[in-house]
Image: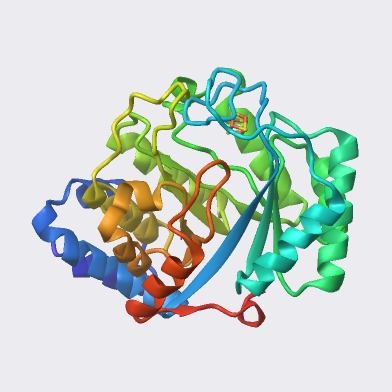
Amino acid sequence: MKWHSLSKKVLSGGVIKRGEARALLESSDDELFEVLQASFDVRRHYFGRDVRLHVIRNAKSGNCSEDCGFCSQATTANSMIPRYTMQTVEEIVEGAREAHRLKAVRYCIVASGRTTPAEEIKLICEAVQQIKLKIPIMTCTSLGLIGPKEAEQLKRAGLDRYNHNLETSERFFPSVCTTHRYVDRLSTAKALKKAGLELCCGGIIGQGESLEDRIDLAFALRELKADSIPLNFLDPRTGSRFETCERIQPAEALRSLAMFRLVNPDHEIRVAGGREACLGAMQVLALFVADSMFTVGYLTTEGQGYQADIAMIQAAGFRVTDVTDVG
Ligand code: SF4
């Protein structure tokens, strides 16, 4: 396949078909740079050389009732992680101030759990209201499964975006989680869209799923019109159900990213958890595909550090997006 023909097709308004997505995932290491070039053509068209920085805040950690195999906060995990109840409004707002200082365009407040109780949703709403009043930064939350009423409540508080990942394909989902269903995730995603919130929705590559499962996920996100797609690469956490999975190879991770870009050309794509662990020295190449990344660290793991992130972005000729350019 001439990989350049795929970017030409996408940039002239065409859509990638399943067979083409499969071919991308099966391309050889010798073709990797051509595949990356094709996805970079699309990335550059929609996002230039900008990189949107996101900072994540683990506002409530551990003790989750769910059994997601990748997660060190799951009820089935026996991981050494911090466990604490919901932080205060002041602590959450202070985190937003620090994220803005680091030039993040978005601050994502995350709480562990299947759902979030009403009084904690109220607390998050208050934090969002204060952030919107005082700090020039876009907001996002990830509070588990929610319904239309809570989605509207968050929207009224001024929240910009909500994260709720599909995690994988519908077919593979029962191997990842048995305490809730794929369809529960889908209906939360739809409720968020309906409430007028931006939808951040992605998944995790390398949990033992097939290439078809990865393609299903990319196409499901296209159908959902997810505004933002975070792609994580499994970095098997000690004590989690997936602790014995092997990390995928850097080239495989990059091919997956490229496939998601070509299937979802104008959507924000974020290289998320597992960037450092799975891509290693090749992580800078992810910026030629993804237009966004987390900095500082993740929910329960450290990243390579803010200074190293900025140095990497600048060395590759990219530019950190200013918050005034977004929204
Ligand atoms: S991913 Fe979320 S719902 Fe699943 S176990 Fe972890 S904290 Fe709980």
Specify the color scheme.
Answer: rainbow
Which residue ends up furthest to the left in the rendered image? 30
The residue depicted at 69 percent of the width and 66 percent of the height is: 98
The residue depicted at 67 percent of the width and 60 percent of the height is: 107
Work out whether 18 lies above or below 67.
below
Q: Is residue 278 left or right of residue 186?
A: left
**Where does residue 108 sit, x and y in percent of width and height?**
66, 55
Residue 265 visible in the shown view: yes
Report the front residue among 12 and 222: 222
**Where does residue 310 sit, x and y in percent of width and height?**
45, 72
Residue 160 visible in the shown view: no
The residue depicted at 58 percent of the width and 33 percent of the height is: 81
- When asked about the image quadrant of residue 287, the answer is bottom left
Q: Is residue 198 left or right of residue 17?
A: right
Report the front residue among 287 and 199: 287
**The quarter of the picture showing ligand 1:** top right
The residue depicted at 78 percent of the width and 72 percent of the height is: 135
Work out whether 57 lies above or below 317.
above
Q: Quadrant of the N terminus?
A: bottom left
Count of numbered circles on the image: 0
Q: Is residue 82 left or right of residue 272?
A: right
Report the front residue among 162 and 38: 162
**Where does residue 309 sit, x and y in percent of width and height?**
44, 67
Q: Quadrant of the C terminus?
A: bottom right
